[in-house]
């Protein structure tokens, strides 16, 4: 069964890069443009992994992560933060809430694969 | 869950470079309303690049260093105020973030160039702006030609400039480029006690070169070049705002 990954970012560019990154692998990518949509998608899709931005309109990533961790149904879903913000306060606050990993933008696609591969199975699709 | 790890331990665990202490130190000093000018001057004197930029800003009419009327960091601080130092200190990591973004996501080397001698941007171009507000207010404005925008978008999205016919995609990439730069900028401000929030990027195609209204504070101009790509950045910051 394909690994289901939820990409939550207000930037279509980043969502496209995430989609392209996992394209060679047996993954299903679900997208959300802000934390509110991300929470709804997490409840509906029960992804194996969430890749989450911090600064977003409507609901930011820290608020979404807080709500996710408060929900008994969703709190065990592993989260990788994908953000340009690597300041002390942000990192400490997010680590305290509980994330599996943290990737700072700009990033290389290989870095995302490496971090995701430590958390969920990534199986290469057979070459057609 | 965090096991009580420090910021440095977390940065090692997650594999990113922690914020340099020198930049944080200067930003922290400047962010205090009772900032000690002597202490700030000492930190600037140890950073030749920052010292040179501060003196250049303090001598706007001078063509070269020989014409400088203000020659010491202390005099430059008295003339320009510490808000100017904040913008200069913050624009260093901002410029580094742009250079790193090009290296990492486009495998392109982009260099900082003197904004006073950089070729002027003409005609239709992309104007990308992010405002920040809180204990410090200001904006980061990025401008680049439409063709340069298509080149960058094509590189990041893995296609060719000719295929980049949807300007919405080009604008989204330009906005994300600015987002990455400014996220770094915001982290430095927040760590120095100047908590602030960023607006979403406002990206538009325009022929209007009118700069945004700066109510108070200092302005820094940066320019970058890589082959056919020229990027112009304007940073303003007004610390201790009542907003």
Image: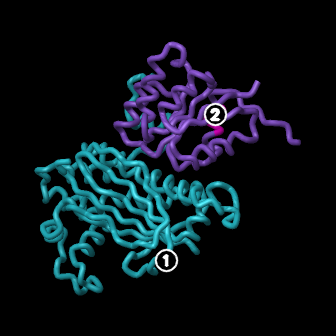
Quadrant position of the C terminus of chain A in the picture: top right
The one of A16 and B19 positioned closer to us in this rendering: A16
As drawn, B120 above or below A3: below
How far across and how far down the image is residue B85, in percent?
A: 24, 61
Q: Residue A100 lies in magenta, yes or no?
A: no
Residue ID for mark 1: B123
Q: Is residue A103 visible?
A: no
Q: What chain does mark 1 sit on?
A: B
Q: Which residue sits furthest top? A: A72
Q: Colour of chain A?
A: purple
Chain B colour is cyan
Q: Nearer the viewer, residue B11 or A64?
A: A64
Asked if residue B88 is positioned above or below residue B14 in the image, the reply reads below
Tag in front: 1 or 2: 1
Q: Predominant secondary structure in magenta?
A: helix
Query: Residue under circle 2?
Result: A30
Residues rendered magenta in the picture: A113-117
Label 2 marks which chain's residue?
A: A
Where's residue A126, x and y in %? 85, 37
- Quadrant occupied by the N terminus of chain A: top right
Residue at (60% x, 28% y) in the render = A49
């Amino acid at each position: 069964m394909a690994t289901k990954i939820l990409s939550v970012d207000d930037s279509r560019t980043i969502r496209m890069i995430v989609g392209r990154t996992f394209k060679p692998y047996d993954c299903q990518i679900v997208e959300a443009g802000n934390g509110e949509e991300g929470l709804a998608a997490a409840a509906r899709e029960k992804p194996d992994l969430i890749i989450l931005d911090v600064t977003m309109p409507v609901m930011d990533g820290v608020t979404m992560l807080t709500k996710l961790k408060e929900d008994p149904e969703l709190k065990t879903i592993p989260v990788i933060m994908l953000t340009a913000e690597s300041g002390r306060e942000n990192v400490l606050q997010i680590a305290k809430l509980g994330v599996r990993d943290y990737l700072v933008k700009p990033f290389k696609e290989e870095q995302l694969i490496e971090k995701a591969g430590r958390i969920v199975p990534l199986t290469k699709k057979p070459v057609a | 869950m965090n096991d009580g790890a420090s910021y440095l331990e977390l940065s090692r665990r997650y594999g990113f470079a922690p914020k340099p202490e020198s930049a944080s130190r200067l930003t922290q000093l400047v962010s205090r309303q009772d900032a000690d000018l002597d202490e700030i001057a000492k930190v600037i004197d140890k950073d030749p690049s920052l010292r040179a930029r501060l003196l250049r800003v303090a001598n706007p009419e001078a063509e070269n260093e020989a014409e400088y009327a203000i020659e010491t960091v202390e005099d430059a601080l008295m003339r320009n105020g510490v808000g100017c130092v904040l913008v200069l200190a913050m624009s260093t990591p901002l410029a580094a973030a742009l250079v790193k973004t090009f290296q990492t996501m486009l495998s392109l080397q982009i260099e900082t160039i003197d904004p006073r001698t950089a070729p002027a941007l003409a005609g239709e171009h992309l104007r990308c702006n992010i405002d920040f507000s809180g204990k410090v207010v200001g904006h980061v404005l990025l401008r680049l030609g439409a063709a340069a925008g298509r080149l960058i978008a094509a590189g990041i999205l893995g296609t060719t400039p000719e295929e980049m016919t949807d300007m919405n995609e080009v604008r989204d990439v330009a906005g994300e480029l600015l987002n990455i730069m400014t996220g770094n900028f915001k982290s430095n401000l927040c760590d120095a006690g100047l908590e602030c929030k960023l607006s979403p990027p406002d990206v538009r195609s325009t022929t209007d070169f009118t700069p945004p209204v700066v109510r108070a504070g200092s302005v820094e101009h940066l320019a970058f070049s890589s082959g056919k790509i020229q990027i112009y950045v304007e940073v303003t910051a007004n610390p201790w705002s009542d907003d």
